[in-house]
Each structure stands twice: as C-alpha cells, then as structure tokens.
Image (cartoon, grey):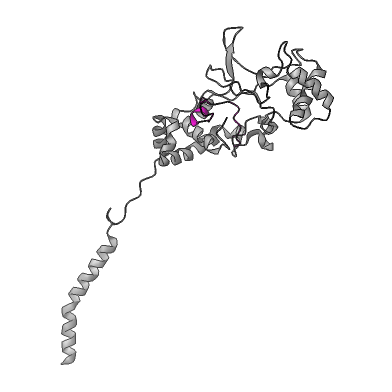
Amino acid sequence: MKTDFVARSLRSVAPLWAAAALGVLAACTQQPSAQQTPSAEQKPSAEQTLATLAGTPIDGVAKDAKLQAAALEVGKKVYEANCAECHGVNLKGAADPALAGKHAANLTDDFWMFWGKDIDTFQMHPSDVERTIKYGVRAGSDESRGMAPDPVHHDIDSVVMPPRGEENNLTPTQIDEVAEYVLELNHRATDKAKAARGYKVFFRKNGGVCFDCHLGDAKGDGEIGSANLLRPETWLYGADRASLVETIAKGRAGVCPAFVDKLNSGEIKAAALYVFSKAGGTEF
C-alpha cells in the first residue's frame, strides 16, 4: 500500500517537475535585457572615424576621449603607410642609425623644427602638425613649411641652407673656422683660436653668413626651420666635424612631401593626432 501511495505521488508531481525544468531551460536561452546587462557600444569603423574627424576641428578632438582613441588607432595605420618610410615605424627619423640617410626629423623628441601658430603660450597643437602633413616642407605650396617672402622677386620662395663654399661666400678656411665655432658652442671644439675666428665669421655683418637664420643665440628660427645649433642631437645631416664642414660648404635643402592631394582630410587629421601624441614635448 505504501509503495502504491509513493508511486501515485510521483506521478502527480512529475508534470510540475517537467514544467520547472522547461522554465529553467528557457531562462538560460533568453537574451539578457538592457536592464540586466548594459550593452557595450559598438566600436566605430575606420571609415566612421575618418568621417567624424573630417567634420571635427582637430584641436578639439582630445575633448572626446572615444574619438581621440579611435583617431589614434586609425592614425597609426595612416602614418605607417605614408610616413614610416622616412621617419620610421618608431618615429625616430635620423636619430635611428638605420634611417640616418633619410635625414628626417625625430618625431619623438621635444624639438620642433617649425614653430606653431600659438605665440601666446608657445605651445604646439595638433593643427600645427596637420599643416605640415598637409602641405609638406618646401613642397612648392605657399602654405608649405620652410617658405618665406622673397623681397627680390616679390613672391614666396623656399628658404634653404645655402652652399657657402660653392657660392664663394666663404673660403675653405672660413668654413672650417665656422665649423669649429659651432663645435665650441657644444663644448666639443679642439682649437679655441680657430673657434674664435669662426665666431667673427658667424656674426659677420657685411653679408651676414650664419646669424641671419640661426639667430644670435644660435637656437635657430622656427619660422623658416633653421637648425638649433645648440642641440646637435636634432641635426639631420650629422653632428661630427666632417658633416658640419660639408653642410656649410654644400648647403642643405631638406623636403617633406605634401599629402593634401594623397590623403583625405580625416586621414591627415588622424596621422597628425598620432604624431602629436608621440612628441616628447609641446613647447616650441
């Protein structure tokens, strides 16, 4: 009798167990509601990021952390595809021995060869890098870096380091003396008397030779991109005596291509933001 009672009891509750099991199974297969688990926003595609950048002033991008992060990710790819050939994947340019022959700037230090437009704070901004990428350096456009009014021809022309030896502006002896003076500025001169003579040539008034562009403090003029002679680690053509002599005698005229016709607005901004994020400092 007891056995029959248990069997009847089990048969009566079996449907309840089955219903409960089905309910648990259904609960496991249901998608969580928005109230249960907030869904993460979908990451924007590269195309969406570039489109947003195109319509956003570049100096305001940093105010939007999500857009900034997306821009840096896309900018890295744009940089590596278009700039790394000269400046390197590591952005070190001529500071990397493997890329010394490219004579490209180190984009990771705190030195800015070309100054920015913010003369109130003397701080660089992403828009300053954007201009360089967009119009290049001595790339033929009036907007290029390294361009200045030519009072003789009444137009805009590129500013270069002239070949003092080939123009017979300086004799070989004077070139050697100026090189010694520049070495003296960096505490590397070996002939103090020669350096003293080089000082006079550097500041020669009748047809200024060096100080016109490198200025009296020898720190260079970022409006035209002349080298800071007190920071040999930033020189693009070597800092040893032989390289200095060659630079003074033969001149230098480094260029960087303009990308205004190769990259779209979003791509240029993305690359500029990426480069700016890697700079060692923002003061010029």
Does residue 176 appear in this view?
Answer: no
The reply to whether residue 205 is visible in this rendering is yes
Is 88 contained in the magenta span? no
Q: Quick check: is 108 in the magenta stretch?
A: yes
| On screen, residue 30 above or below 61 | below
Quadrant where the N terminus sits is bottom left
Residue at image location 22% in from the left, 70% down from the top? 20
In the rendered image, which quarter contains the C terminus? top right
**Please, what is the dominant secondary structure of the magenta stretch?**
loop
Q: Is residue 174 left or right of residue 128?
A: right
Q: What is the total number of numbered labels drawn onto the structure image? A: 0
Q: Which of 112 and 164 is in front in this view?
A: 112
Q: Which residue is drawn at 82% across and 18% down?
A: 173
Q: Is residue 177 above or below residue 6?
A: above
Q: Where is residue 180 in the image (x, y as percent from the top left)?
A: 79, 26
| Rendered location of residue 90, percent (x, y) | 60, 39
Residue 2 quadrant: bottom left
The residue segment tinted magenta is: 106-128
On the picture, is 104 further left or further right than 181? left
x, y percent for residue 239: 73, 30
Q: Which residue is at a point 78% across and 21% down the rendered structure image?
A: 198
Residue nearest the viewer, comparing 151 with 162: 151
Residue 5 in the image: state x and y as whole percent: 16, 88
Q: In this view, does 160 lie above or below 58?
A: above
Q: In this view, does 48 lie to the left or right of 117?
A: left
Q: Can you tell which quarter of the image residue 144 is in? A: top right
